[in-house]
Each structure stands twice: as C-alpha cells, then as structure tokens.
Amino acid sequence: MKNTVKAGVAAVKVLENWGVKNIYGLPGGSINSLMDALLEEKENIHYVQVRHEEVGAMAASMHAKFTGHIGVAFGSAGPGGTHLLNGLYDAREDHVPVLTIIGQFGTSGMNMDTFQEMNEDPIYADVAVYHRVVMTAQSLPHVIDEAIRQAYSQRGVAVVQLPVNLGWEEIPSDSWFDASQVYAQPKLANPDAKQIEKAAEILENAERPLIFAGIGMRGAGDELITLSKKLKAPIMISALAIDIVDHDYEAFLGSAIRVSRKPANEAVANADAVLMLGTNQPFIDVTNMFEHVNHVIQVDIDPAKLGKRQKTELAILADAKKVVHSLNENINEKSETAWWRANVKNVANWKAYTDSLEQDTHSPLNMYQVYHAINKVTTPNALFSTDVGDVTMTSVRHLKMSKGQMWRTSGLFATMGVGLPGAITAKLDYPERQVWSLSGDGAFSMVMQDMATQVQEKLGILNVVFSNEQFGFIKDEQEATNKGYLGVEFTGIDFAKIAEAMGAKGYTARKVEELDHIFEQALDDIEKNIPVLIDAKITGESPIPAEALKLDLEHFSKEEINKFKTRFHAETLEPFSKYMKEEGLSEAGKATAQGGF
Ligand code: FAD
C-alpha cells in the first residue's frame, strides 16, 4: 500500500474535510501542482473553471455570504493572484471567511526576480487576516488547515502562497491531520438580565420607538415582528438585511439613506429611541442619522462595534436574536400609538406608490415594470445575487421578498460585477432553488465573459440585465454635485446576442407587453439547465431619491414639489409630516440630503 501522498493532494483533502465542495480559479504554471491535486481528487471536490480570477474570488466570497461556509478561490503567481483582489476585499469588508491559494514560482527560483516571481506576501498583507508562504511540503496541509481556522475565527480572508514544486512532493500519508471535525464557533453571548430590563424600560417609555435591524438578525424575522408589534415600533433594516422581514409586514420601513425606502428615512428622522440589532450600517455617523434620537440601545456580538457610530445609552454585548427573544418575554404588548399609526399609513402610501410604478403598462419599458415581471415568477425560496449600482437601490425597493428567500450583494466594499459570480455559486450551492443575477449593464459588462462559465457548468440561472447605457447611480450623484456629466454614459451592448454566442439563451425586452412571455420562456430554459440572459432595454430615468425628498410644503415651494412629483411619477406620494399631523404628532426632523458618497 502506498504510504506517501503528494503534499498538494493532502492539502486538497484538508479542504474536503472542511466540507469545501467547489473551488474557483484558473490554472497557471505556478499553480499547476494544485491543478494536479484537484485532478486526482476530482470525484471529491469540484473545480469550477472561471474565465477571470476576479469572478472566482467574488464567487468564493458570495458563497460564504449565501451559505456561511468558507469559500475557496485560487490564482497563479503575479497577475492571477492580483486579479483575485477585488473579490478578496469584498470578503474582507463584509467579514466572511474566504481561503485563497496563490501560486508561486518553485523554491529554486524564489527571490530571484524570475518570471512572475515576486515577494507576494505584502500584496496580500492588507486584505488578509492570515497570509503565509508555505516553506516545506510537509507543512502544506497544516498551513491550509491553519488558514481555514483563521478565516472562520477572524471572519476574513486567509491567503496561502504555494511554491509550485512543494505541491508535487511526497509526504508520509499519516503525517498530517486537520481540525475540521473539532472546530467550533464560539457560542454567542446571552444578554444580561439587568440590561434587558433597562432596554425594556427605555423602549416602553419611548413615544417614538424604532427597531433598526441588520444582518445579525438573519433568520429571526418572525420574532422581530413580534417585538415590533409589542412595542408598536416600526422596523427599519440595513440594506443588507432587506430579506429578513416579509415585505408585506405593515410596519416594515425598509432601509435608510440612499439605497433605501422613503418611510425609513422619514421614521429615523423623527424617532426618539432606536434599538439597533446586529447592524454596523456605515452611514449612521457620516449622515448624523440619529440627530433627533434621544435614546440608542445597541446590540452587537463584537465589542469593537458598540458605540462606534453613535452616542449610545445602553450597549448590550450579546446575540441580537437572544436579546429580541428576551425582550419579547419581558414586554407586554402596548396598545396602538399615534406614532405607530402614522408609520403604518406612511408605509402604505409608499407601497401604493411603488405598486403604481410597477404596474404601469403605458410608459416605455422601465425598471419598475421589469421588477413586476420578476416578482410574478419568483419562487418562495428564490435566491437573488444583486449587483452594485442603481440595481442595489431598486432591488431593495421593488423585490417583494418574503421569508425563505435570500438576497446578497457586495455590501461595504460595493464592488460592481458581483451579481453574476454570486449567482454561479448560489446555483452550485442550491441547485434545486431558483437563482437570479440582477445587474445593470455597466456592472454586467465587467464580468460578462463568465456567462461562459454558467453555460459550461450547465447552471439554469436567470440573469437580468437592466440596460440603460449609463452608470445611473453615479450619474445621479454627478447631477447633484458636478458641473456636468462625464464618464457616466456609454454605448449599449446587445447582451442577448452575447449570451447566445456563449451557448446561453438570450432575450431582449423592449416593451412591457413582452415581459411575461419572455419570463415564461426563461423559466422553461432554466428547467433544462440552460442559463438565460434577459436584456431589458429600459429608460434612463432615475429612481426617486428617498434621501432627498421634496414633498413637504413646510420645506419646499409648490413649484419645487410639483417638479419633483412629476419627475418621479409621485403625484400620490405624501410627506410623513402629513400622517404625523393627522395623528397629532409634530415633526422632529426631516430626511435630509445625503448625496456625495
Ligand atoms: P454589517 O456591516 O456586516 O454589520 C453587521 C453587524 O452585526 C456587525 O457589527 C456584527 O458584529 C453584528 N452581528 C453579526 N451577527 C450578530 C448577532 N448574531 N448578534 C448581534 N450582532 C451581530 N445600506 C444602507 O442601509 N443604506 C444605504 O443607503 C446603503 N447604500 C449602499 C449602496 C450600495 C451601492 C451598496 C452596494 C450598498 C449599500 N448599503 C447601504 C449597504 C452598506 O454599505 C452596508 O453593507 C450595510 O448597511 C451593512 O449592513 P449590516 O449593518 O446589516 O451588516
């Protein structure tokens, strides 16, 4: 019996033991010993050949976001590795575990400034929580295991640089082990009973309480709604947490600032107490979001986040879900308040507005109608991989999400191009579920070569491209801050033809009446494991700036309001102050302009 194993094969077995099913990357001379190991282990781990390393790294990062498990990507020395960086930074900024293996010239040529050889460690030092060069074949499986543990425990990127010859060297079969079977995540802390009492007191006494939940509340939407009803506190979320509460909940405000819904911006400007649950939303401080809030309670599992972005009256270092559970047990249901009624009316007014946009059949094709078509065919457990740009904003407004669906994007790093790679991993991870990639044409054209990967892997993904020949999100910023437009408009692309040329199905929608039929055909195609691209040629109109509303006669002239309403088809949209007045409440603050980020 063979009692040695190639070090590269041992390294791949470590990945398998940790439950890694897919590994993304491109071959190269400096990573070929890993390729050999993947070939030898092909029955146990699936190598996904992407067409650009960046897509591989973004897929790995999005894998971690969709599943909670480590994502793995690799690239060769020099450019192969540096191509990965965008995806690695995405993982770093959203704190998800990713392992990347970077090729290196063989040890005989290291430090000789030979082809593609350089000191790689400094390149990855910033992005990684762990970055090491493997020095001996014997230590290779150990270094991979260490990297995985570090990536999980520090919730970040681990980089292993592998001199190519070491992966081919034989090591004793029984000379390595890994921690995959014993690794345990720390138990999230229970809240302190006294702090729960204090939090309950603050919230029960507040006249205008607001719940502000982030991804720390994932999976506990029902309990959050229970608390909201008991406290008569509407729920605001971070944009990343848009999928945690059913869209239909009457007091669901959506997210605040720009990738936002109007009711959230208006509610937070008028709240007197905020309960933050597992969110580190990055605009709280820079926009002075809690300007009029008297009491902030913050719950987080990371001590470094407590009090980071706002003055905090009560900081609770505990699992947000356990805090909500304890509060629900300690709080008696309040009777309906004026604040509650005003918010519920405001949410209903906003919903009527977005419904009217989505259901309008007379206008030239626009993004709202496309979302309507998407909403009609999404399944209850659909997965959305959403790109960065206007599509992030319009998705958090117009997708009618409910419990069971998942929505992921590049949150803090906000890298364009993340939609398509995220959909690749989502479909590989959950082959039975409906998977959407939603992108603008700017972002999609950054990664469109990897439609070929979807075809090669036979992934029945619904790729929707909102084509309006512009970087709309930035164009609107330039409108607010610049002398004119530059670099925000571009020549259109026939994406359906591109998809067809790659072996996918391509459809072009130009009119609202074409949408339903196209989506029906697309559903048939994906059943046959054929990826579909729907190129929706939409108008270039801007979504309403929910952070810079001009609706209230107290603050704007009739002319300004009329112009604003006409531009955004917002004739029926009312300022929150109207509902507050109806309920006998006075306005504390208004949602202010937050442009320029
Ligand atoms: P994170 O930043 O990941 O923070 C989660 C927090 O929860 C962390 O502090 C963590 O320690 C803690 N935590 C995790 N688990 C638990 C637990 N079990 N219990 C307690 N605490 C826990 N977002 C907006 O809201 N508004 C915007 O206008 C906006 N604009 C954007 C524009 C674009 C183009 C893009 C791409 C994104 C935008 N975002 C916006 C997203 C934004 O950048 C952040 O990524 C997002 O707001 C952060 O969400 P979060 O706080 O839930 O997640």
Image (tube, rainbow, N blue to C red):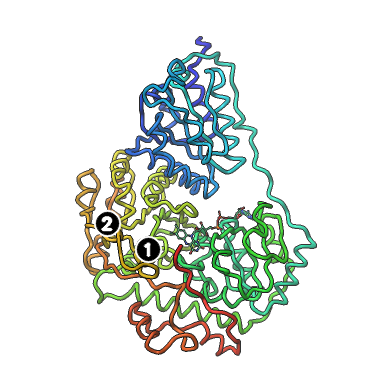
Q: Earlier in the sequence, mark 2 or mark 1?
A: 1
Q: Which residue is mark 1?
A: 473
Residue at (29, 45) in percent of width and height: 451
Res 192 → quadrant: bottom right
Res 41 → quadrant: top left
Q: Which residue is mark 2?
A: 534
Q: Nearer the viewer, residue 417 or 187?
A: 417
Res 40 visible: no
Q: Nearer the viewer, residue 455 or 442?
A: 442
Q: Establish if 527 lies above or below 579.
A: above
Report if the beta carbon of the residue with label 1 is closer than 8 angstroms to ligand 1: yes
Residue at the far top: name it. Answer: 1
User: Residue 13 location, x and y as percent?
Assistant: 51, 26
What label does residue 44 carry, if any?
Answer: none
Res 586 → quadrant: bottom right
Q: Nearer the viewer, residue 462 or 490?
A: 490
Element under disc 2: strand
Q: Nearer the viewer, residue 576 or 258?
A: 258
User: Residue 403 location, x and y as percent?
Assistant: 51, 61
Q: Amino acid at mark 2?
A: Ile
User: Residue 510 location, x and y as percent?
Assistant: 21, 65
* Cα–Cα gap, marks 2 and 1: 21 Å
Q: Amino acid at mark 1?
A: Phe
